[in-house]
Amino acid sequence: MARGVALKRRFPHVQTTAHRVRYGETDRMGVVYYAHYFAWFEAGRGDYLRELGADYRMLEEGRGVFIPVLEASAKYRRGAEFDDVVLIATSIEEANRVRLRFSYEVHRQSDGELLASGSTIHAAVGRDGRARPMPRELLRLIPIDEGD
Amino acid sequence: MARGVALKRRFPHVQTTAHRVRYGETDRMGVVYYAHYFAWFEAGRGDYLRELGADYRMLEEGRGVFIPVLEASAKYRRGAEFDDVVLIATSIEEANRVRLRFSYEVHRQSDGELLASGSTIHAAVGRDGRARPMPRELLRLIPIDEGD
Amino acid sequence: MARGVALKRRFPHVQTTAHRVRYGETDRMGVVYYAHYFAWFEAGRGDYLRELGADYRMLEEGRGVFIPVLEASAKYRRGAEFDDVVLIATSIEEANRVRLRFSYEVHRQSDGELLASGSTIHAAVGRDGRARPMPRELLRLIPIDEGD
Amino acid sequence: MARGVALKRRFPHVQTTAHRVRYGETDRMGVVYYAHYFAWFEAGRGDYLRELGADYRMLEEGRGVFIPVLEASAKYRRGAEFDDVVLIATSIEEANRVRLRFSYEVHRQSDGELLASGSTIHAAVGRDGRARPMPRELLRLIPIDEGD
């Protein structure tokens, strides 16, 4: 059914990272300061890649390939509070020789409330800082839903 | 002329904040970690409001009005390096009873190179966390280009 | 035996917190920036108190008791690197009505290498910011080695 | 006179760095989180060295000499609050071929109140991570009080 097809994710893997909110991540409003979500996103995509078997550190150190952030965005719905456990759900929305796009949702573990969502777009560069194709060895690891 | 009108900014004020990149803001790629730009944006909008005569701390403490971030985004073009002086140019793109939208550009001082740009969207909430109109006393301070 | 007594810890509980080093915690030297260890120490003492059954958040919110840091120190022996798992071992060295002293060791999980050690000293204050005795309900939870 | 000698500083230079407290530096207690003072100390010693004419970035990049932190400590007396301007006064207490020791005081600009003090101890290492003597070119720049 068309509807079923539409709902399917092309990249079905979702990786969940748990994090307990630290005191130092809160600000005087009593909730987590907005910039810290981007550090949580990084933890999420690190776990995503590691779970697939990719070794990002080796990619940098051995192959001289870096995958910096080109764009980042977040929407905030509810504040995470000190001592909350948050779950960062990371998935991939786009993966090709030009770029990777990660997508994130942060939920409060206790009640499942969605606190924030976001995305980051990445490209590959070499040690010289020049753009290069996203490594095939990385792309091959990303599970694709082959469809019906 | 239509062209002239189109080029005019509705909110013409641009505030510049200088910041010297700290060692701790860099990451192992040798450039500033992407999340720190959002802290720089905060410094930029703080200076913007202060320059207009707004006292955000008093707004919170005296009036019980908070203006949290609802959305944030950034695009990264070049890495800022340790010891660089960066200039954060902050302006307002939208200001009404529902929301504020700030826009930012980060340039390297030495050669004017654009390193990153971004925006944040804010709404007003009361001490109870409920949405409320953006305070008129704040909106009144934001200079508007009255046109021809 | 005297030697045995000397080796005994008055407060025998040691709490271990695992943390995977994030990219954003490294600096351009390729190792974790020194200030982040203090955030790790905070995670360590949070787990320590939680494990004992203390609810620090409730202590603040319900009782109006805060336990800020008065002094903090760290010694650095080896750099933690991106993607390392570090183990923060937290113990208490002193606990009385005047102050708490936590002690920390950070080891690399892979080979047990000691990376850093440190301590923090805390006192209790009320909502008014004035010093007050450390709450007995907290002290009671801290296990003491009663000796021979 | 002995008294006069005792009061003199061997390294008389004191460098002052101003910083406006950002929202994201506060925590839910409403004051600056303790770990951020170490980032301020870094800004202070960076300004100290730059003022003397030392180029720490060039020392790393050109000479392959790094001066990491071996020990760090801080004492906290009063909390810095959002929007406060703080002045970080940095001086050197010890400077020789084995180590540098910086000392810091953080004062609130508005009333001069001492908020925190601290120190850091540094050694020199080469690109290989091995200890090496502190560069003479750096030590030569540090002004010494030659006494009577």
Image (cartoon, coloured by chain):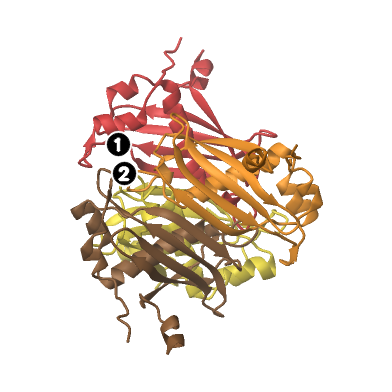
Chain colours: A yellow, B red, C brown, D orange
Q: Which mark is residue B66?
A: 1
Q: What secondary structure is found at the residue carrying circle 2?
A: loop
Of the two numbered discs 2 and 1 in the rendering, the one whose residue sits closer to the viewer: 2
User: As drawn, is B120 to the left or to the right of A131?
Assistant: left
Rendering coords of residue C35 (x, y %): 52, 55
Residue that protrudes farthest toward the front in the picture = D1
Asked whether B63 or B30 is in front, the reply is B63
Measuring 32% from the left and 27% from the top, which residue is drawn there?
B96
Q: Which residue is mark 2?
A: A29
Q: What secondary structure is found at the residue carrying circle 1?
A: loop
Residue that protrudes farthest toward the top in the picture = B148
Rendering coords of residue D7 (x, y %): 62, 40
The C terminus of chain D sits in image quarter: top right
User: As drawn, is D83 to the left or to the right of C148?
Assistant: right
User: As drawn, is D102 to the left or to the right of A148?
Assistant: right
Q: Which mark is residue C4?
A: none
Measuring 56% from the left and 68% from the top, which residue is drawn there?
A139
The answer to whether residue B77 shows anywhere in this view is no
Measuring 64% from the left and 48% from the top, which residue is drawn there?
D93
Q: For the residue marked with disc 1, what is the amino acid?
A: Phe
Give the Cα separation between the discs numbered 2 and 1: 8 Å
User: As drawn, is C31 to the left or to the right of B118?
Assistant: right
- Please say if D20 is above or below C99: above
Asked whether A101 or C98 is in front, the reply is C98
Tell me the chain of label 1.
B
Quarter location, residue B57: top left
- Please say if A124 is above or below B130: below
Q: For the residue marked with disc 2, what is the amino acid?
A: Met
Q: Are marks 2 and 1 in contact (CB under 8 Å)?
A: yes
Residue that protrudes farthest toward the bottom in the picture = C1
- Please say if D82 is above or below D118: above
